[in-house]
Amino acid sequence: MDEPALIRNAQRGDLDAFNTLVLTYQGMLYNTALRILGDEDLAADASQESFISAFRALNSYRGGSFRAWLLRTVTNACYDELRRKRRRPTTPLEPETEDGDEVETPRWLTDPNASPEEQLDQVELEHAIQHCLENLPTDFRAVVVLADIQGLDYTEVAAVINKPLGTVKSRLARARLRLRECLQSFRELLPAAFRLEEERGL
Amino acid sequence: MTTPSFRDVEQLSASLDGQLSQAEKTRLEARIQLDPALAAMLADLSQARTILHRTPKRPLPRNFTLTHKMAGVKPPVPRIIAAFSWASAAAMLLFVFTLGANLFGRLSFGAAAPMMAAAPNVMGGGIGGGPGDAASTQAPLTSEYAILSSPTPGAQMNLAPHPTLAPDARTLPFETRQTKYTGPVNLWYITWLFLAILFLGAAILIRWYSILAFHRKSSPK
């Protein structure tokens, strides 16, 4: 895939070229939105919205990391959604058992191809991570999702959140510190394979 | 063993991502060797980072590719549309012009008829000579009927058309004149109207097909 050529064609209004870029980055954008918002439907809406606004604002892209540029649109869409959510708080609908009790662990969201044990491991890990992420301030959450979950380097994160490198470094350190404390409280819940592995050494 | 400061935590965090210079890295490594609290903090931060790296990726609920409607892209207008539109407009203009000319012709001829009706009387006096002059002064000028019913034989003779003159269209009854004038005009404005409708219909059909093709192409795959 010749990304610069696709971007140029998309800038000239070629929707097929832009859709090729969408297919490449939609997984990353959706998962970023999902980790920031913690809601599948809102994440899907934010992703769709960000692709639409990206297409309309494509001429404002002046080179650099296209991935970072797209992630910036989705991060902004997530911030907007979080602001809206704060203004109009809602009660999330959880799946219920036959007796009408809420299912605490959303097993219905798991990958159906994984074995039951793997599904359980994944669900518990995801649940713990999402809980800890949602306890972080929005700005810290975005940085940690971009750097530690999506694997962006500091420069790209700085481009996405439009802040200097020093801010990225500081926010990431604070976020990791808080996550460390939060994840330690989930230690017993985490599957053995994910229990705070030893990664000592620089 | 001291509790690491935030500055230390920041350094440790950055070291995990390879964001320290060689000098900073060497200094930090030396401190970690001496301070178990720093080593423990580094281990915790690293473990938290590892867990985050392993966050499962959720499958997409759907594709986020854009349709033309989402992107606000309008269907392109085929070039031929412009030709048909202009042709339709021209035909309509000619239709209106022809229709107007026809109506104007009817009105102008219709209005002129009573005035012209007096002409034979005036001419009658001139052409026939003799008592026509008296008739022209005595008979009412505006009434053709009065002249035709005049008891004076000379007056009747004077009304007969002169054999050397070509038949004057103005002396023909109005209905006859109208039939002779409007025949070709009717044909023209029917033609222009038909062409205008034909071109407009063609333009609409082409546009409709182009929109259909556009939406078929842009529907989600």
Image (cartoon, helix red, strand yellow):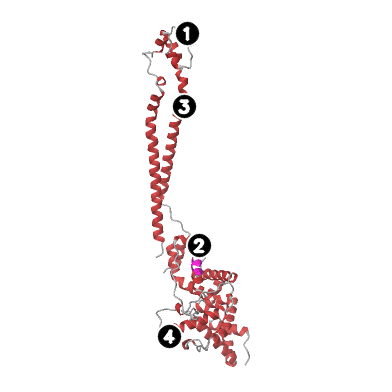
Amino acid on which the number 3 mark rests in the picture: Ser
Q: Which residue is mark 3?
A: B108
Tell me the quarter of the picture where residue A167 sits.
Answer: bottom right
Q: At x 38% / y 41%, what residue is drawn?
A: B195
Q: CA distance from mark 1 to mark 2?
A: 94 Å
Q: Where's residue B50, x and y in %? A: 50, 84
Q: Which residue is mark 1?
A: B134
* Segment tinted magenta in the rendering: A45-55
Q: Which residue is mark 2?
A: A56
Label 2 near label 4: C-beta < 8 Å?
no
Is label 4 or label 2 in front? Answer: 4
Q: Where's residue A59, x and y in %? A: 51, 62
Where A179 falls versus B188 (above or below)? Answer: below
Secondary element under disc 1, as helix, strand or loop, is helix
Q: Residues within 10 Å of mark 4 (few under 14, many from 20)?
A: few
Task: Write down the chain letter for disc 4.
Answer: A
Q: CA distance from mark 4 to mark 2?
A: 45 Å
Q: Where's residue A101, x and y in %? A: 50, 80
Q: At x 39% / y 44%, what residue is drawn?
A: B199
Discs 1 and 4 carry the same chain letter: no
Secondary element under disc 2, as helix, strand or loop, is helix
Residue A55 in view (yes/no): yes
Q: At x 43% / y 40%, what residue is drawn?
A: B92
Amino acid on which the number 2 mark rests in the picture: Arg
